[in-house]
Image (tube, rainbow, N blue to C red):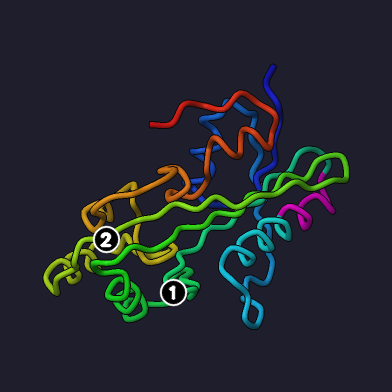
Amino acid sequence: MTISVILASRSPRRIELLGQLGVALEVVPADIDETPQTNELPVKYVERLAREKAHAIAATHSGIVVGADTTIDIDNEIFGQPVDEHDAARMLRRLSGRTHRVHTGVAVHSNGTVQSLVTTTLVTFVPVTDELLRWYLETGEWQGKAGAYAIQGLGASLVEGIRGSYSNVVGLPLRETAQLLGIEPPLEG
């Protein structure tokens, strides 16, 4: 039996990942204020935003709503999407040669209740040379990506290794999302 889900996001990566679970999908992006609260920890931040996105869409649509948010965390600093190329370069320099955390909060709103969780994956970057940084920035791939890179694209060349869920780094932890939806989780390698 296929379940129907409303995704409170316009992220092409989340649309593709959620589609892999075999659900019937409707996309209704949530428009919420994503400003971090004072002293808000990255894990709390992504869970709050996921819940707020799910609530916002559930207020006007009936059915199962999935909200999600992903952020990069280095030294408890939240790295969202860069505002410009200079900001992207700053982020990538900070991540260079270090291990950071990728947190994704997922919330499922159904029948008036919300369940949520946060999945964390550790990602280690190679030392990013000026030449590598210049090349990656010129690709433009950093635009619209938390932490200024896309592991599923050319940004993989910046990554030495990961520990945890790959799909989480892309933008939606499949196994955990499937569990929240009550469907058989996929095998993730």
* Image: 50 above or below 72: above
Q: Residues within 10 Å of mark 1 (few under 14, many from 20)?
A: few
Q: Residue at x 66, y 78 (%)?
A: 37
Residue 50 falls left or right of residue 12: right
**Residue 155's quadrant in the figure?**
bottom left
Residue 138 falls left or right of residue 176: left
Q: Nearer the viewer, mark 2 or mark 1?
A: 1
Q: Residue at x 64, y 65 (%)?
A: 44
Amino acid type, callout 2 = Phe
How many numbered marks have been drawn onto this rendered protein structure? 2
Which quadrant would the N terminus be assigned to in this image? top right
Q: Main SS type for the magenta part?
A: helix
Residue range corresponding to the magenta coloring: 54-61
Report x, y in % for residue 42: 56, 68
Residue 168 falls left or right of residue 92: right
The residue identified by callout 2 is: 125
The residue identified by callout 1 is: 75
Report x, y in % for residue 185: 57, 27
Report x, y in % for residue 116: 70, 49
Amino acid type, callout 1 = Asp
**Residue 62's quadrant in the figure?**
top right
Secondary element at tag 2: strand
Report x, y in % for residue 174: 53, 37
Which quadrant would the C terminus be assigned to in this image? top left
Q: Residues within 10 Å of mark 2 (few under 14, many from 20)?
A: many
Q: Residue at x 63, y 49 (%)?
A: 106
Identify the mark at residue 172; answer none if there is no mark: none
Q: Residue at x 77, y 58 (%)?
A: 56
Q: Nearer the viewer, residue 162 or 87?
A: 162
Q: Residue furthest left?
A: 131
Q: Residue furthest right?
A: 112
* Image: 43 above or below 8: below
